[in-house]
Image (cartoon, rainbow, N blue to C red):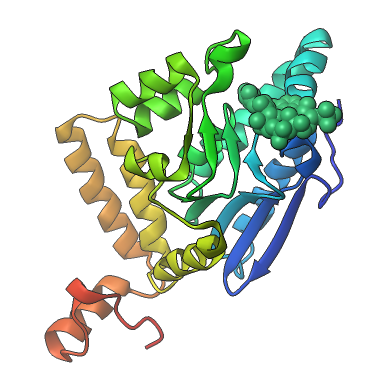
């Protein structure tokens, strides 16, 4: 198993106007997630974390697929038949980038679903903060069709993202559904005609880029943490986290925002972000 994929082979990265476009790049295999993609994605997102030019990550796929899920041959058949230590290493690396890392990634992430999206690709989709789809993208929890359950962390991801009736309907039937339906059930934020997908994704990324990055980072971490906590623990955690963030904020956003609103009357928090460059 190749655990050291050459950068740029299975995953393409392009940084432009603050957006890091991270493209799964095995179009001939519908971007099925192979060990090559797994180990390259681990390296890619580590590298992008430290790159100040990359303010928002957009994950998408090349060709006509977002991703056809885990690679049945390279992710399952070959590793399952080989050294169990390597198999475990692969599965850990996959879990690392697909949800542990993406869910708590210190920058906003958007899944841009341009086409086929099956099985394991739901983990990536659900771990991203936001998601946009082409109207005609096709989604499916196809595991039931080939004799397994949505394992990895797919069932958990779907249970967190969807209402029970929708989650179980697609888990048990394996039916495909399009981008419009994905928006209807809240799996993506919205869907648009394919020729508008990139521009609408850029506009969504731009909305977050004029906000304080430390606040974005803290807000998403806090969201995921409190989902598992009691109300009392959540209140304590949120207040402590907010105080910690205010103390650490290099641009002193909260006092700047208050000054601009209360003293200078130069902006209204209800209508947009404070002016960060002052
Ligand atoms: N794992 C391994 N290989 C895959 C794959 C996957 N998940 N998805 C597609 N491929 C490969 C095909 O085997 C084929 O390889 P080949 O050219 O060597 O024969 C190639 O990618 C193109 O696939 P093909 O099925 O011909 O493309 P299509 O556009 O007609 O259909 C899909 C696209 C996505 C509907 C179909 O490929 C499919 O059902 N893939 C499996 C989806 C799935 O169940 N994923 C869940 C995994 S957990």
Pick the front one: 186 or 57? 186
State the residue at coordinates (29%, 34%). 227
| Quadrant location of the N terminus in the rendered image | top right
Where residue 14 sits, quadrant-wise, is bottom right
Q: How many numbered marks, from 0 up?
A: 0
With 200 as the anchor, is 13 left or right in this view?
right
Q: Nearer the viewer, residue 26 or 20?
A: 26
The answer, for residue 106, to whether it is visible in the render is no
Visible residue check, residue 90: yes
Taking depth in this image into account, of 4 and 77 the one nearest to the observer is 77
Q: Toward which corner of the image does residue 214 lie, by quadrant? A: bottom left
Q: Is residue 150 left or right of residue 43?
A: left
Residue 172 lies in quadrant: top left
Q: Report the quarter where the C terminus lies.
A: bottom left
Against 165, residue 60 (above or below) is below
82, above or below 32, in the image: above
Residue 109, horizontal then vertical, whole percent: 50, 53
Say left or right for 170 vs 253: right
Vertical relation: 150 (above or below) 108: above
Q: Which residue occupies 43% across, 48% down? A: 129
- Residue 47, horizontal then vertical, whole percent: 69, 54
Q: Seen in the image, is 26 located left or right of residue 216?
A: right
Residue 64 location (% of width, % of height): 68, 46
In percent of the image, x 45 and y 18: which residue is there? 171
Task: Please provide percent x and percent y for residue 28.
Answer: 80, 40
Instruction: Tell which quarter ligand 1 is in.
Output: top right
Which residue is painted at 63% across and 12% down in the image?
A: 146
């Amino acid at each position: 198993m190749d655990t050291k994929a050459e950068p740029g082979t299975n995953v393409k990265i392009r940084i432009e106007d603050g957006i890091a476009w991270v493209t799964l790049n095995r179009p001939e295999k519908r971007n099925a997630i192979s060990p090559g993609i797994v180990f390259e994605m681990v390296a890619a997102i580590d590298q992008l974390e430290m790159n100040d030019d990359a303010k928002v990550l957009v994950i998408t796929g090349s060709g006509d697929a977002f991703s056809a899920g885990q690679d049945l041959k390279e992710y399952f058949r070959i590793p399952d038949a080989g050294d169990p230590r390597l198999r475990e290493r692969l599965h850990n690396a996959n879990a690392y980038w697909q949800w542990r890392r993406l869910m708590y990634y210190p920058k906003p992430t958007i899944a841009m679903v341009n086409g086929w999206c099956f099985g394991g690709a739901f983990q990536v989709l659900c771990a991203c903060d936001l998601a946009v789809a082409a109207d005609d993208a096709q989604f499916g929890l196809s595991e039931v069709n080939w004799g397994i359950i949505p394992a990895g962390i797919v069932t958990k991801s779907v249970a967190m993202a969807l209402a029970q009736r929708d989650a179980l309907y697609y888990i048990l039937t394996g039916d495909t559904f399009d981008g419009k339906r994905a928006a209807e059930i809240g799996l993506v934020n919205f869907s648009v005609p394919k020729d508008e997908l990139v521009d609408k994704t850029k506009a969504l990324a731009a909305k977050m880029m004029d906000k304080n990055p430390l606040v974005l980072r803290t807000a998403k971490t806090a969201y995921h943490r409190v989902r598992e906590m009691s109300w009392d623990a959540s209140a304590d955690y949120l207040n402590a986290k907010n105080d910690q963030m205010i103390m650490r904020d290099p641009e002193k956003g909260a006092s700047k925002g208050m000054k601009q609103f209360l003293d200078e009357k130069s902006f209204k928090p209800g209508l947009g972000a404070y002016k960060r460059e002052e």
